[in-house]
Image (spheres, coloured by chain):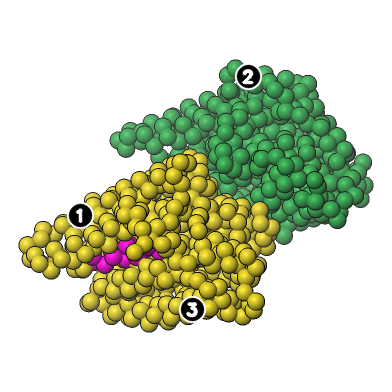
Amino acid sequence: MPQVDWPALLPQFFLGGGGLVLLTLGSLLRRRLPAWFPAAFSAGAALGALGGVIWLWIRVRDPARGAFTTIAETIGIDGFSVFLSGVVAVSVLLAAVLAAGTLRREGLPAEEFCVLLLLSGAGGVTMASANDLIVLFLGLEVLSIAAYVLAALDLRRSTAQEAGLKYFVLGAFASAFFLYGVALLYGATGSTKLPLVAGFLAGGGPDSNALLLGGMALLLVGLFFKVAAVPFHAWTPDVYEGAPPVAVAYMSAGVKAAGFAALLRVFNAALGANAADWQPIVYATAALTVLAGAVLAAVQSDVRRLLAYSSISHAGFILVGAEAATEAGVAGSLFYLGVYAFLALGSFAVVSIIGCGTDGRQSLDAYDGLAKRSPALAAAFTVLLLAQAGVPFTTGFWAKLEVIGASVEARSYWLAALAMLGAVVAAFLYLRILVRMYLTAPAQRSRPSISRSAGFVVAVCAAFTLVFGILPGPLVELTNDATIHLGG
Amino acid sequence: MIVASASTQAFPVLGMLVLLPLLGAAAVLLVPRSRVELVRPVAVLFMSGAAAAAGWMIASYPVASGGFEMIVDQPWVAAWGISWKLGVDGISLFLLGLTALLFPLGALAVDPGHGHKAYYMWLLLLEFGCLGVFSALDLLLFFLFFEVVLVPMYFLIGQWGHGAARDSAVKFFLFTMFGSALMLVGILATAFLHAAATGGPLTFDVVEIAGAQSLATTTARWIFLAFALGFAVKVPLIPVHTWLPDAHTDAPTAGSVILAGVMLKLGTYGFVRFGLYLFPEASRFFAPLMLTLGVVGILYGAVVATMQSDLKRLIAYSSVAHLGFIVLGIFALNTEGLSGGLLQMVNHGLSTGALFLLVGYLYERRHTRAIADLGGLARPAPVFALTFMVVMLSSVGLPGLNGFVGEFLVLLGAFEAHRWWAVLATAGVILAAVYLLWAYQRVFHGPARGDNATMADLRWREGLVLAPLLALIVFLGVYPRPVLDRMEPSVDALVAHVELHGAPAGSDVAEPEAAP
């Protein structure tokens, strides 16, 4: 029986345990729970997880104690895993707050949604701290299966069903690829524990590279799918379009963070010694993802598809940081993930406000003249969009600076230049929305009805974007401290 | 070599100058919705405060100094070595003054008609960005300002513009963003390679990087190109100029004034401060290319301006020609050319700013800018016509007005350095006279028909806005000494810097990281 450091698992307990408790309560007291309860309960659970994360952060940063592993080295608690657990917990928290005001209006089952949200979050924090490929796979499946159902939650709309099914089938394929990659890597290195894998590779590696390379390639396919990198992105626009905006808000922030947690931990840390083997693949994928995402986004007419492609482009930027294969690159990717979580959550909160009561249609026309109909909402959305375009004095600029800087420092000049060109193309699509909001006469005069919770989420995200855009110092320090320690 | 002098004043006037518009934007936002009439006075008050600060700076600037004065240095993002480092020398001093002057005039000149609060807020934020660009001594801080000006300008053109304002605004934003996209990569490469070569911590301090000259020759040339693309779009130089006529024509009057008067200078100023200063060898290496682009701009701008039927578009193309002169002066790489180019930046701001104001007034009266619809305006509006005449002649470069001094110095410098380019550029001077005088003749002379016959003359309020510009146009034409005196030490220092580091280091092969 391995030693278990129970407090290290606080985020998992709060999210996973919270999900199970809510599931039990929901099925026992189906009709007697007040309407606000599920969302409030999950927000509380997420807050608890966040508290655990903060406590762990203090513990990890304490020089006397530092990073550690537990349960026979299968869970690694270091700055990296704690930071990304925090991102996942914040995503769950804000999604839960957003859900409080939106689920009922969209006629979605609140208990089911919140249970799945919490379980998926539990999978996310497990992925963030997994120090063993099998545990990583467990986290991945818990996260994904809940996300599949979240995508298909809207029973009345066929697009939601289609989205869920597509996500599930393709996701299952990707998981299979991932698992096969794990098997090959095990064959090549003799272990699924990341510290042992890293140690084996540092000590000379296997005699023949075939198994190792095959394993890496298959792992990359699986993870590229999860983070929606081109050419494994095809599910994203359909899912973002069909799934309820609340679910998408969580998926674009939390699921993405968890996917990148796995990618960075496995490749930049455990397989860091063999960076030369995987860097070219990540290089090409990053360039392709940034550019294709931006170009395809520019021609969309549905806001959710547009934001889906834009999120693909952002994933490309995060890959630019990963490609650098340096500590600065990992820190840059973390910074980008943390910042993007707020941008995505805020943007999809706006989408859920505007899309409410429109029966799922979400053409750009719905944003015509929003600046006149609801100036505050338009201003907040403007901040979020400009930040995604990388305009200075927003967090988005610093995020781009972090990854591009790491890339330049690692002498990947062409990748950095390509990514910046992709950013210009992407700016066009954010301008398209701005043009609709400010420079187009509204077709209807109606003011969008903003629920208090959705307004709160948008305000928090916009405020975060501006405040840390003007004073990015603390966030930069935070991500620079969030380093990976495999232990062992 | 330019060295930062340590004259940090007790009162940080430069910091105040840059921050005043930002505070003004906040103040404008706080004006209650019921008191919209207060917005304009508040905005103009803050802009005038900035103008007063700039005037005080010009007056108190130590004439003999060739280095950076009034330095403000506040650490910002420690992990990246970025700081709020601001400073002013003879090169940026008058551009700051020009910016601080044109903004209140633009704000006073024309009422936006709707959305007052947002309009003045964007104007103030734009001023903040422009002042920041001209005073930033930290590469990344400079880039932040350089980029952030796009947002207010985008909204100003899009929301308060005429014609195809939406498309022009988007075009403006994307063109300039495209230009500066690679510049960020260049800035980062400069800083990282500098840090690697010197072994010091990461820094974006312009003075330090320019002083060390630690980059290998070939590397510096590549990075110069990345910078040059960003500046070339802003200037604009010929192949990347197509955003300019649309943006200038469709922008509201204040927008055109600022765009032509201030924002085009962001590009030429960038060439001086970050092209020549950081990459002297590369600047010299690419000087023939830049000179050619400058001359092509002069001739192309002039020829195309002659063909225009829209008065505002004509002035927009004349800017292309004028900016060509400035680039010609800068890349002559000698004291005459560089001072001429700098002076011409100020001159162009004054005269083109005044021209756009006048065209704006004309449009308010006649609701057209088509030259064919106008005619004989000198009869009903003699003062208007006279003012237009003076401003136009200053733009043509008539001796006795400001445009002459700058153009003369530019041509002198260019002739010394590259004779044939100067000869070609002179043709541009003649063409400028052709298109401007011809346009003036068609608009103000001849018989006045229809509404033209009853057009109102210049009102005293409009005259008051134009008066400072006219005064400076005459003053700088007659007595440019005070300006040149303050410019020259810095220009001399820069020219000496380019001379000193202008030769290839001879280590084309050795990458900087090879240094021990």
Q: Colour of chain B?
A: green
**Residue at coordinates 46% horizontally, 46% vertically from top-left?**
A66
* Front-lying residue, B194 or A377: B194
Q: Residue B453: x percent and y percent?
A: 56, 44
Amino acid type at mark 2: Gln
**Residue at coordinates 28% horizontally, 50% vertically from top-left?**
A47
**Along the horizontal axis of the image, is B187 left or right of A81?**
right
Residue at mark 2 shares a chain with residue at mark 3: no
Q: Colour of chain A?
A: yellow
Which portion, as a residue range, is magenta?
A113-130
Residue at mark 1 shares a chain with residue at mark 3: yes
Tell whether position A122 is magenta: yes
Q: Residue B87: x percent and y percent?
A: 66, 30
Residue holding disc 1 = A40
**Residue at coordinates 87% horizontally, 43% vertically from top-left?**
B502
Residue holding disc 2 = B9
Q: Does the rendering let one see residue A121?
A: yes
Q: CA distance from mark 1 to mark 3?
A: 41 Å
Amino acid type at mark 1: Ala
**Residue at coordinates 67% horizontally, 18% vertically from top-left?**
B60
Question: How many numbered marks are there?
Answer: 3
Mark linked to residue A155: none
